Image: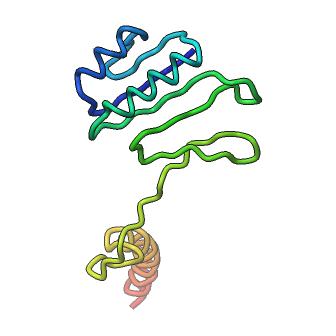
Amino acid sequence: MTVIILTACPEGLRGHLTQWLLEISAGVYVGHVNSRIRQRLWTKVVEMAGPGRALLVYQQPGEQRLSFEVHDHHWEPVTFDGITLMRRPTERRPYNPALSRGWSKASKRRRFGRRTTESTSGSLASHEGSEGKQ
């Protein structure tokens, strides 16, 4: 089985793929084609994709029984101990000194407010008892 997923690709490419594969959702094509046709389709996808992205998943003998090809995609296939995984790039945000670190004021109030009300209520009860004696 072969699956091709297109994102932001031209209409001509989508029309070309419908000659060989079934479009089951917008930009998702599925079908059974041999390896020669699959490679020609993938070459055509890479040629015609333009600014779009493409992902190809197909059957292959082995432990995982599938393999991946990507074109202009942020995620990349990586082989790890004989298994192909998709590596998603991490977003490193630059340090912004305007953003404070640590607990927010609301969480501090919530956390410490409970302690002060419990300790205050106990001290009020003892204070009222001492006033009655005087």
Q: Residue furthest bottom?
A: 134
Q: Is residue 94 above or below residue 12?
A: below
Would residue 129 appear left or right of 13 to someone viewing this image? right
Q: How many marks?
A: 0
Q: Considering the image in quadrants, where does the N terminus appear?
A: top right
Image coordinates for residue 70, horizontal then vertical, percent: 47, 38
* Residue pictured at 39% horizontal, 44% vertical: 72
Rendered image quadrant of residue 29: top left
Residue nearest the observer in this picture, 126 or 110: 110
| Res 101 quadrant in image | bottom left
Between residues 48 and 93, which one lies in front from this camera angle? 48
Residue 84 location (% of width, % of height): 65, 40
Residue 24, given in percent of the width and then of the height, sits at 39, 12
Residue 8 sits above or below residue 36 on the image: below
Q: Residue at x 39, y 80 (%)?
A: 128
75 sits left or right of 110 in the view? right
Nearer-the-camera pick, 70 or 123: 70
Residue 120: name its quadrant: bottom left
Q: Residue at x 47, y 46 (%)?
A: 75
Q: Nearer the viewer, residue 28 or 44?
A: 44
Q: How are the colours assigned in the image? A: rainbow
Which x, y percent locates residue 12?
Answer: 24, 20
Residue at the far left in the pictured view: 11
17 over 84 or under it: above or below: above
Could you tell me which quadrant the C terminus lies in? bottom left
